[in-house]
Image: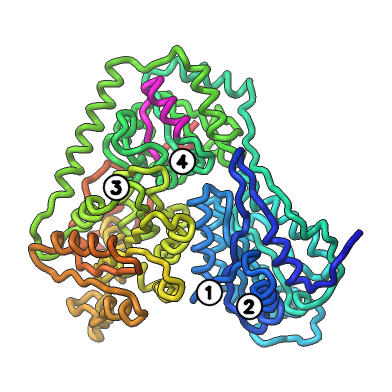
Amino acid sequence: MTTRRMTVAQALVEFLGNQWTVDGDIRERTIPGMFGIFGHGNVAGIGQALKQVNVDDPDLMPYHQARNEQAMVHQSVAYARMHRRRSTYASAASVGPGAANMLTGAALATTNRLPALLLPSDTFATRVADPVLQQIEMPHDTSITVNDAFRPLSKFYDKVQRPEQLFSIALAAMRVLTDPAETGAVTISLPEDVQAEELDVPEEFLAPREWHIRRPLPERAPLARAVEVILAAKNPVIIAGGGVLYSGAEDSLRALAEATGIPVGTSQAGGGSMLWDHPQYLGGVGATGTSAANRITAEADVVSGVGTRFSDFTTASRTVFQNPDVVFVNINIASFDAYKHGSRLPIVADARESLDALLVELADYSVAPEYAALVASEKEQWDKRVDEAFEPSGATLPGQTEIIGAVQAASDPRDVVIQAAGSLPGDLHKLWRVRDALGYHVEYAFSCMGYEIAAGLGVRRAAPDRDAIVMVGDGSYLMLHTELVTAVAEGIKIIVVLIQNHGYASIGHLSETVGSERFGTLYRTLDTTAKNFQGEQVLPVDLAANARSYGVNVIEVTPGADAIEQLSAALATAKAAETTTLIHINSDPLLYSPDGGGWWDVPVAAVSTLPSTQAAYDDYLIQRARQKPLLG
């Protein structure tokens, strides 16, 4: 057996550079590059290995800088989504705070069922230096390190405590990373001393290796039971989730909808699985859904979930399905999601393979003409409401709906809109008219503030021929805006539309609905008498100047009746530019988008001295009475 003498870090970097994902006829690099921020934990290990590869074979594992460890993972996740989970980046961090900064990214990747490879450095395995700088110490268990916090957040976790362990750990990590049923954050903890230790590495370990994406077929018996139920349905509906896109099943979904007339609603992750103007597409469903999707789904007797994890937003906290006899067919490649909510008809299989099988079995089925007419009527009514909502009001401070309408009008069909947190995801879910399968990129499983700008970079890395349009409120912007420096450093073009609300618009609205009167949600100076931040004095913060200080081209929309007209012109300028542009616009956070009839369960204080809370609790009890214990 031929071997090479290498350090653990050198062997790992070369190994990762030779991994390939195969999905049908598509073959691509599983790990096309690595982000890294270096400290004493990895500068002599992963850092040295990346430098050596950069000199010897720069295309094997390209290195990219980042300004925040969390943002490295966000970029990786966004890239993975655009590549339908076939490819992602690795992220290397130093000991202690560097590793801990990646924890949010790990949780986001796992929650979204999207692959990301995390390589946090760890303290000395030998403990020759103990405690080392930045080491956490737990008196009850001195073996615990910061990296143990990755265990509950990762779909795979292991620590290379001896050089010889690298081989089995790296291979096991790749298996999970490329498994559509198991993927998420994959974490390999790397003690700083072990990274730099030497070992004999078999050439076989370093040779190119292929990982084939599994596309399991639906089993005959579960499929037959589902077909029997659908054939008897009078008001069937399909809810498409992210699994449709990750499976590349959007054509199969459209074919099934057209052949049967069954209408389709989408979760946030499923946005793009059907295009907005398709006759059978009703838009987003659930708490942030359209009235068309929610009204049709409320009366559905058979709900077929395809590649959705049925989160509380998708189910409107189990209130959107009001037919007492509703039956659920739940198609998912992960059994955990297929059996969720007590589904009586789970199908554990690939989304595309399942939809293709259903198309054959339902060849003679179609919905009744009166049901098709109802679907068409609801869709027409909602589309008209959106048209009206997009019309500029001429107000000095436009509402968010008008801003979305202007961005929509200025965008091209293949542009990608990117969002994650605040009031924007809900409005986009209802209003954004998706014209391309990968054109809607809203991270809403973890809904992580700060995801947006980093994700914009990940999207643009994955699809350099598309414009990445990041829409972000000032709250999310302040969480993680430093990756604008990365955009400048690498010449990566993104378009950022920064909406200045002077606070947390989404939570402010939610605070009102639960009777908390927007407490703590406004960006105001401290009222030393009232001891709160509820006054009228807004903060003298200049976010446009902040972005400009990073070297970003900034266009400021001044408040006035022509604000939307200015925004449209700014978007045209940004799209024509070759570098990153940030557009700053002020909005009125009290102007809301059209109501889609969804509800979200956020508990209200059962006892309160505040009249607003008392009223909110009364309404809460009414809404909760509509909840179902299981979907069934």
Q: In the rendered image, is residue 309 in sight?
A: no
Identity of the residue drawn at 41% across and 43% down: 437
Question: Residue most toward the front?
Answer: 56
Give yes or no for residue 443 being in the magenta stretch: no
- 1 or 4: tag closer to the N-terminus: 1
Q: In the rendered image, is residue 353 in sight?
A: yes
Residue linked to disc 1: 65
Identity of the residue drawn at 57% across and 67% down: 103
Q: In x, y percent, where is residue 204? A: 82, 56
Nearer the observer: mark 3 or 1; the answer is: 1
Residue linked to disc 3: 432
Residue linked to disc 4: 241
Nearer the observer: mark 1 or 4; the answer is: 1
- The amino acid on which the numbered mark 2 sits, given as a three-letter code, is Ser
Q: Marks 3 and 1, how far apart in space? A: 33 Å
Q: Marks 1 and 4, how far apart in space? A: 33 Å
Magenta span of residues: 251-266
- 2 or 3: tag closer to the N-terminus: 2
Which secondary structure class fits the magenta region best?
helix
Q: Marks 2 and 3, how far apart in space? A: 40 Å
Residue linked to disc 2: 94
The quarter of the picture where residue 234 lies is top left
Query: Neighbour class for label 2 at 10 Å: few (<14), some, many (≥20)?
Result: many
- 1 or 2: tag closer to the N-terminus: 1
- 3 or 1: tag closer to the N-terminus: 1
Question: Residue most toward the right?
Answer: 1
Q: Marks 2 and 4, how far apart in space? A: 36 Å
Nearer the observer, 380 or 552: 552
